[in-house]
Image (cartoon, rainbow, N blue to C red):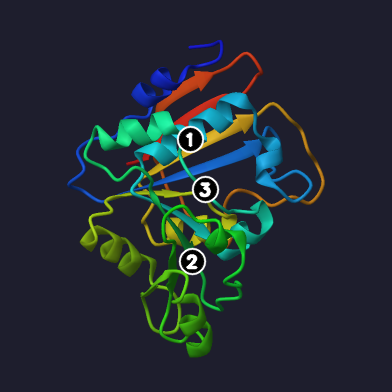
Amino acid sequence: MSGMPARDELLAAYALPDRDTPRLRMNVVASADGAVALEGRSGALGGATDRRLMQVLRAMADVILVGAGTVRAEGYGGTRVSEADAEWRVARALPPQPRLAVVSRALELEPRHPFFAEAVVRPVVVTCAAAPAGRRAVLAEVADVLVCGEETVDLAAVRATFADRGWTRTLCEGGPHLFGTLLAAGLVDEVCLTLAPRFVGGDAQRIVRGAAEADRRFALTGVLADDEGFVFLRYAAR
């Protein structure tokens, strides 16, 4: 498929199986030479179809999971799906908007940050028991705080806690350290990788950081392209 894939084509190409089994999907973008960001932001690498795909993947999700560093770097705030996507969700017995969750051990986020102040649905903070109690109390005023793990955030427990709440479809939007931790724990079911027609150079990170080297094999389940030269790859864990 080439051209500029329409919303309905993307909905069909990225459709998920039944909702009974918890599923975690990564959505990431990288330049052709492997950079995860341009001038410090991954969003600077994207294009029109990439942004459309991001909205489609968000529409399919119960909860959007991001790391605290990504919230700060990418300026998350007031994240919402479009009216058409909200209607699509309601027609499938889903709430109009997905939940937005941030993972943080240190809780170095301010309650006035746009992530909280501009939220259209009460956001979620995922942390661990060792997180500063005072910070937990402050953020509990503006978000649902979930404690998963003792000294560090237990991402397997996060997945189970989400499932207990009926959130079986998790979309993770990074960053690289969160992706690496999820990958190392064997919790990534699918990767949606946008390959941007750019060669960035510099010292930009890769899309995965912190995971030990291993031969983690995924199957290529979908390939799309658009007229701007972007390639959209869909991988499923074997």
| Location of mark 2 (residue) | 103
- Disc number for residue 55: 1
Frontmost residue, 6 versus 215: 6
Mark carried by residue 79: 3
The structure residue drawn at horizontal position 48% and vertical position 44%, both measured from the top left corner, is 80
Mark 1 surroundings within 10 Å by alpha-carbon count, few (fewer than 14), some (14 through 19), many (20 or more): some
Q: Is residue 145 left or right of residue 79?
A: left
Q: Nearer the viewer, residue 151 or 127?
A: 127
Q: Residue furthest right?
A: 202
Q: Position of residue 7 (x, y in %)?
A: 44, 22
Whether residue 122 is visible to the viewer of this picture, yes or no, is yes
Q: Earlier in the sequence, mark 3 or mark 2?
A: 3
Q: Can you say whether 50 is above or below 109 in the image?
A: above
Asked if the residue at tag 2 contacts the one at tag 3, i.e. Cβ–Cβ closer than 8 Å, the answer is no
Under mark 1, the amino acid is Gln
Q: Is residue 40 above or below residue 51?
A: below
Q: Relative to 106, is 14 above or below?
A: above
Mark 2 or mark 1: whose residue is earlier in sequence: 1
Quarter location, residue 155: bottom left
Task: For marks 3 and 2, give the one nearer the viewer.
Answer: 3
Q: Quadrant of residue 200?
A: top right
Label 1 and label 3: CA atoms lie apart by 10 Å
Q: Residue 68's x, y, as percent?
A: 57, 64
